[in-house]
Image: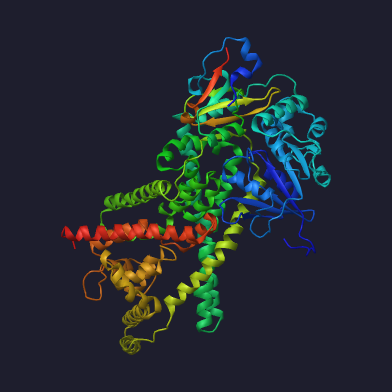
Amino acid sequence: MSETIAASPPRTIAVLGNPNVGKTTLFNRLCGARHKTANFPGTTQEALVGRFDGATLIDLPGIYSLDLNLSESSICRAVLAGQLAPEGGSPRVPDTLVVVVDATNLLRNLTLVAEALRLRLPTVVVVNIIDAARRRGIHADTQRLSEVLGCPVLAVSARSGENTDRLPDLIARAKVPDRSPPEGRDAVEAWAEETYAFVAAAREGATPDTLTDRLDRAFTHPVMGVITFVAVMTGLFWVIFALAAYPMDWIDRLFAGLGGLVESTLPAGAIRDLLSEGVVAGIGGTVIFLPQICLLFLLISLLEGTGYLARAAFVIDRLMRPFGLSGHSFVPLLSSHACALPGIMACRAVPDKRDRLATILVAPFMSCTARIPVYVLLTTLLFPGRPAMQALAFTGCYVIGAAAGLLSALVARRSILRGKSRPMALELPSYRVPDFVQALRMTADRGWVFLRKAGTVIVGISIVLWWLNAYPHASSLPEAESLRAQAAQVEPSDPSASEALRSEADTLDARHAASSSFLGRIGDAVQPVFGPMGADRQLTVGILASFAAREVFVATMAVQVAGTDDTEDAGVQQALASATRDDGTPLFTPATSWALLVYYILAMQCLPTLVVTAREAGGWRWAALQMAWMSGMAYCCAVAVYQIIRAMGHA
Amino acid sequence: MTSLATKPDASAEIKRASIPLTQLTRGCRGRISEANLDADDRAVLRAMGLKPSASIEVCRAGQPCIVALSGICGGGCRIGLSKDLASRVMVDPDD
C-alpha cells in the first residue's frame, strides 16, 4: 500500500452508511483488490482500508445513526472527528465524506444523511441499489436531492456497475454542503419526510413482496425454520469438518515432503534440524489451518449474501439468550467444533461488543478436531474393547466442553462483561443471489490476515518449543550402544533379531533424549504442579509439549514410552496402554485417564488460538484471561476428578 | 416520544388505545405510538426506522415478529424483532 511517499499525509475519504446499503460493494468498486482490513486500535471493530486516487479510503462500520450509544456509532463519531484511525494510520479529520444510501429505503437513510451533513465536511451522497428501486417502481430524483442537500448526488448500482464509472468524478466534486438540516431527532425525522416527499415518487403504492414474506415465514417457522437451520448448519459443519480434511491432508504431506527434502539435501547438523523440524514444521502447522478458515469464511460470506443469516439469528437467539449470548454467536461456536481459529475469526459478525468478547472467550471450550486424537487415546485406555462405552464417553466430552463454554459465557456476561444486551432487532435484508467475487475477496482477506498476523507469531513460538524439546542433544546411552554392537554381531546369522535389537536401542535413546531435553527437565521441575491430577514426569512433559497444540500430546507420549511418534502403529498403542511410571506403577490408571480427559476437554492448550484471540479481541489481556480461565478451570476439575476417583478406591 | 395528539389526522378520528405489537396478526397495519424501553434501546429502534407514527405492516407474528416499514412513496425495509422486544412496542392499529 505504499506506492508513493507523499510529502503531506494522504487525503482521507470516509465511507458512511446504514448497514446493508452495499457500502462494501461500492468500496470494492473504488479500490478493487487494493485494500486490507484493519481493526480500530483497542477495539474488535474492523474497517476496510483501501487506496483510491492517491487517497486513503476508509469503509466505516454500518450504522443507523451517529448518535447511538453503540460501539460502532462511537467509532464512526471518533473517526469523523479526526480522533481515531484504523491501525496503521494516524487520526485525521476526513477530507471527503461519502454517504451511501439505499434507494429502496431512502426515507430512513435520509436521517443519517442529515446527521452527516451537519458535520460540515466536503460531502457527496451516493444513492445505491437503484436497479432494485427501479424494479420496485421507486424513482429518486437525484437532481432535486442534490439541491435539497446542497452537495453532489449520484445514483448508482454498485452491484451491477451501473454509473459507477462516474464515482471518481463525483468524489472530486465533493463540497461542504451549503444547506444545513435541522438538529434534534424529531426535527431530523420531519426533515427526512419532507425531503423524501420532494425527491421520491413511486409508480404506484408499494407492491407486497409475497415471495420474501413466504421465505421469511418458512425460515423463522417454529418447525420448518428449525429444520432448515439444522440442515444449513449441518452442511456448514460438514464442509469445514470433513471437506477441509482433504486440503489439510495435502498441506500436511507437502510440508512433510518439504521437511524430508531439507533433510536429504542439507548436511546433518543443527541448521538442518532447525529448518526441517522447526521452521518447515512450524509453517506447516500454521498453514494447515488455512483450509478451514477459508472454507468457513467463503460459506459465511455466501450465506450472508443470500440474506438467510439474519433470519437464522432469530431461530437460535432464544437458545443463546439464557447464556448471555445472542443468535449471532451460534455460527462462531459451531465452527469452533472444527477449529477455534476460524470460529473466533467469525465472531466479527456478532454485532454487540460484549456478546462478541464473550463468544471469543468461550469458543475454545468447544471440542475441536485437535482434541480428537487425545479423546481417542484416553477413551480407548479407559474402556478397552468396549466401543459402545468409548463412543458414550466421547460424546460426553463434546457435551461437557459445550456446557462449560456456555456457562462460562454466562459467568463472563454477569461479571467482567456485565451490561445489558442490545435489543434483538435486526434489519432483514432482501434475499439475493450472493456475490461470489466479494465472498472470494473476503475469504482471501481473512486467510491473509491470519497468515500475516497470527502465522508469524505461531511459527516463532513453535520454533522455540521445538528447540526446548530437541535440545540439548543427548548422546547415545551405553546400554543402547551395547545393544547396537550385539545387533551388528547377530546380523549375518539372524537379520530380524538384529533389527529388533536396533529398534530397542533407538527406543532407549529416544526415551533418554526426551527426558534430558530442556522440556524434559522443565517437566521434572513442574511435575509437582500436575501431580495432584495424577500426572508423573512423562505425562507432565506430554501436557507441556501439547501446549502448542493438543494433538501433540499423543505423539509426545508415544515418543516417551515407545521411542517413536508413529501413533498409528498397534504396537505403540499397546505400549501406551501398558506403559509404566519411573516407579514401575501403571502410567495410565483410570483415575489419571479420567483426570486427563477432563483436563483436555477444558484446558487452553492451543497456542494459535491465544494469538488469534489477542488479535480479534483487541489485546493480549483477553488471551491471558482466556488462558487463565480455561486452564484454571481444567486444572481444578481434573484434580477434583482424580482425587474423587482415588478416594472411591479406584487408584 | 411525541404524542399522537400532534398528528393532524389522528385528531379527526376517535382515538383508540395503543396495543402491543405482539397483538397484531399477520397482514395487520398500524402506526407506532411508543416503545416502553430505556432511552438507549428506544433510540436504536428509532434509528432503524421504528419511530413514532411510522406505518408498519406485520409480515409475521410471533417469535420473531417481522414488520415491514414502508415509506410514503413505496420502498422500505423489513425488521425482525424478538417477541420480548415486540411486546414493548405499542402500536395504533389501522382499521
**Which of these two is toward me, A396 or B17?**
B17
Indicate left or right for A481 with A19 as reference: left
**Which of these two is toward me, A347 or A578?**
A347
Q: Quadrant of residue A470?
A: bottom left
Farthest residue, direction left: A649
Q: Quadrant of the C terminus of chain A?
A: bottom left
Indicate left or right for A183 with A295 as reference: right
| Residue A582 pos. (x, y %) | 25, 76
**Which of these two is toward me, A219 or B48?**
B48
| Residue A115 pos. (x, y %) | 69, 38
- Vertical arrangement, residue B69 with respect to residue A561, above or below: above
Query: What residue is at 39 percent from the left and 84 percent from the top?
Result: A474
Indicate left or right for A573 with A44 as reference: left
| Colour setup of the view | rainbow
* Residue A159 appears in the picture as rendered: no
Q: Quadrant of residue A551?
A: bottom left
- Vertical arrangement, residue A457 with respect to residue B15, above or below: below
Indicate left or right for A466 with B77 as reference: left
* Residue A470 appears in the picture as rendered: yes
Query: In the rendered picture of this protein, how many numbered marks are placed on residues?
Result: 0
| Residue A403 pos. (x, y %) | 36, 47
Q: Quadrant of the N terminus of chain A?
A: bottom right
**Which of these two is toward me, B10 or A456?**
B10
Query: What residue is at 36 percent from the left and 50 percent from the top?
Result: A404
| Residue A360 pos. (x, y %) | 48, 52
